[in-house]
Image (cartoon, helix red, strand yellow):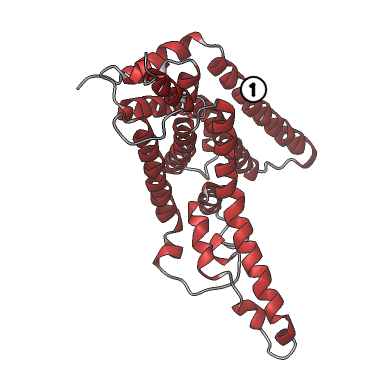
Amino acid sequence: MRANPIYKRERTVGSRSIRLPMILTVFNSILALVALLNMYSMVSQVEVTAEIQYSAFMELYTFGAMIVFAMILFIMPALTAGSISGERERQTLDLLLSTQVTGLEVAAGKLMASMYNVLLLLISSLPVMALSFVYGGIGLWDLAFLILSFLASALFTASIGICFSALCRRTTMATALSYGMLVLFVVGTYAVNQFIWSMANMEMTGYANQIGGIGSQVNSGGFLYLLLLNPAVTFYEIIRGQMGWQETMTSAAQWFGSRPSNLVLEAWVPVSVILQVALAGLFLAAAVWRLSPGLPRRRRSGEKKEESQGKQPV
């Protein structure tokens, strides 16, 4: 089994670029600054009250995880949106596809290169994230599960960028559509549920004074399951479970009205991760379809002009 040539080339080119080292430096500087401020505030509190707040280490873990997750959401579309469209702009994509390299290898190689960068990002953040091990509260399996969820979110966001990079001719358009699709999943799914729930509450306003507790029966219906495609909600549920916030923080299943429990609501995180990975596979399949030669596509206007000029009588 031969190694993916696109991945090897991306690794070679990436090792010569200053972009990844700069991202790692800025990212770890932010994490280190947060950790130092957290430790400083803890020491200052000990000097005043002579008490150690062990929950501060848990807060550090939570805040660090939030920074990593936000970096994944914002960086991955930027890293992948120009991966294929950039080849097209440099006029190297057609040459690449004219070789023995297939469209699947191109998409997979670009994806593997972006996932490699995310893996470096996660590994570099482990020392700060592991500070929560000093006084317990977070176990090794909790951290491993969080990293796996980060990789699933990275796969989901990277596949969106690669899909639009293959479909669009310009990197700017691919980047805009990638971020737009990500906003649709993160903000749009929540906004739809909020709108449906608000409309249902408005319809029940006239009866609320007559029938007690009817407001608790209002919910967003089946639109709640759209949140399964929201990586931010998945991250929230993971942190909520690891921090023990079941009693203080409302579950995503109950955000928009109470509803009877079922298998999907009880296994929200596994179902959500599976659906997002499956959707990532669909985005990658669309990219492979666009890159595969021999499939019917619209010809460019320039190609049509050349063909019409070639048919002119001599």
Q: Quadrant of residue 292?
A: top left
Q: Secondary structure at mark 1?
A: helix
Q: Is residue 86 left or right of residue 22?
A: left
Q: Residue furthest top?
A: 16
Instruction: Give the left or right position of residue 82, taking residue 280 as reference.
Output: right
Q: Toward which corner of the image does residue 59 lie, by quadrant?
A: top right
Q: Is 203 on the left or on the right of 14, as rendered?
A: right
Q: Is residue 69 visible?
A: no
Is disc 1 surrounded by few (<14), some (14 to 19) or many (20+) residues within 10 Å? few
> What percent of the width, then of the height, locates residue 314?
37, 13
Q: Is residue 86 visible?
A: yes
Q: Residue at x 52, y 42 (%)?
A: 136
Q: Residue furthest front?
A: 314
Q: Position of residue 270 (x, y in %)?
A: 40, 53
Q: Residue at x 22, y 19 (%)?
A: 2
Location of the N terminus by quadrant is top left
* Above-or-below relation of 312 to 199: above
Residue at the location (52% across, 50% down)? 230
Residue 224 location (% of width, % of height): 53, 63
The residue lying at 55 percent from left, 26 percent from top is: 171
Figure check: 197 above or below 304: below
- Return the x and y of residue 217 as percentages of the image width and height: 60, 79
Amino acid type, callout 1: Ser
Q: Of all residues shown, which one is farthest toward the bottom? A: 210
Residue designated by label 1: 29
Number of numbered tags placed on the structure image = 1
Residue 47 lies, with reference to residue 245, above or below; the image says above
